[in-house]
Structures are given as structure tokens and as C-alpha cells.
Image (tube, rainbow, N blue to C red):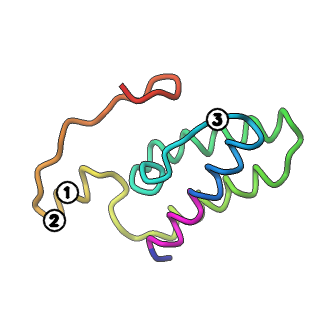
Amino acid sequence: MASIDLTAAAAHLHVALRRKVGRITDIEWMATDYAYAQAMVALARQKAQELSDDTLAQHAQRLLEAWQARRLPQTRGELAAEEGVAVAPPQRYVWGVRM
């Protein structure tokens, strides 16, 4: 699956979370950082269960499948190491806010 499909899946999940939960996410970060994507998938699944919303769960599953189909490094650090580029220290993800 191309990175455009990963970005599209992240965008769909972003819109669903914004509309149904009121949660604002970072699409680009979801499409480039596997840990953040996993956290958003977990949140979406939790809220889908609470709200009995199948579409939210489907968007979360689609993002997870897009990541699993991707055969590239799963973190910015791994990608940068492959390309030989220096990377800024990773940002912490605490309770939904980048620190």
C-alpha cells in the first residue's frame, strides 16, 4: 500500500474522531509515526465501543491495515536512519498532547 493510502486512512480516522468524539489529531503524524497511529487506533476503538459506532471502528481498522501493509520503517527514526538524515529527539505523547 502506498503512503498516499496511509495518509488517506489517517485523514478518514481524523475526520471521524473530530466529528464523533471531538478529538483533533495530527494526520501527518499518524501517517509517519506508528506509535501515534496505534494510540489513535486504540482511542478510536475505545470510543467506537462506548458509542456503539461501527464506522469509527472501521476507520481505525483501515489505518491499522494500511500500516501493516506498509513495508517501510515504522518510525521517523528508522526512516531517517535508512536515509542517513539526522532526527530531532522524539516528542513525548502524553494524554493526547505532544510535549
Q: Residue at x 50, y 52 (%)?
A: 27
Image check: 37 left or right of 42? left
The residue sitting at the right extreme is: 52
Does the segment drawn in magenta span residue 9? yes
| Disc assigned to residue 83 | 2
How far across and down, in percent of the image, does residue 28 sit?
43, 53
User: Which span is picked out in magenta?
Assistant: 3-10
Q: Callout 3: helix, strand or loop?
A: loop
Q: Residue 63 placed where, x, y %?
A: 59, 58
Sort mark 3 into few (<14), some (14-19) or many (20+) by Cα contacts within 10 Å: some
Which residue position holds label 3? 23
Question: Which residue carries the number 1 mark?
Answer: 80
Q: Position of residue 58 (x, y in %)?
A: 75, 57
Secondary structure at numbered mark 1: helix
N-term-proximal mark, 3 vs 1: 3
Of badges 3 and 2, nearer the viewer stands 3
Whether the residues at callouts 1 and 2 have beta carbons within 8 Å, the answer is yes
Is the magenta region chiefly helix, strand or loop? helix
Expressed as whole percent of the image width and height from the top left, the position of residue 55 reads 81, 55
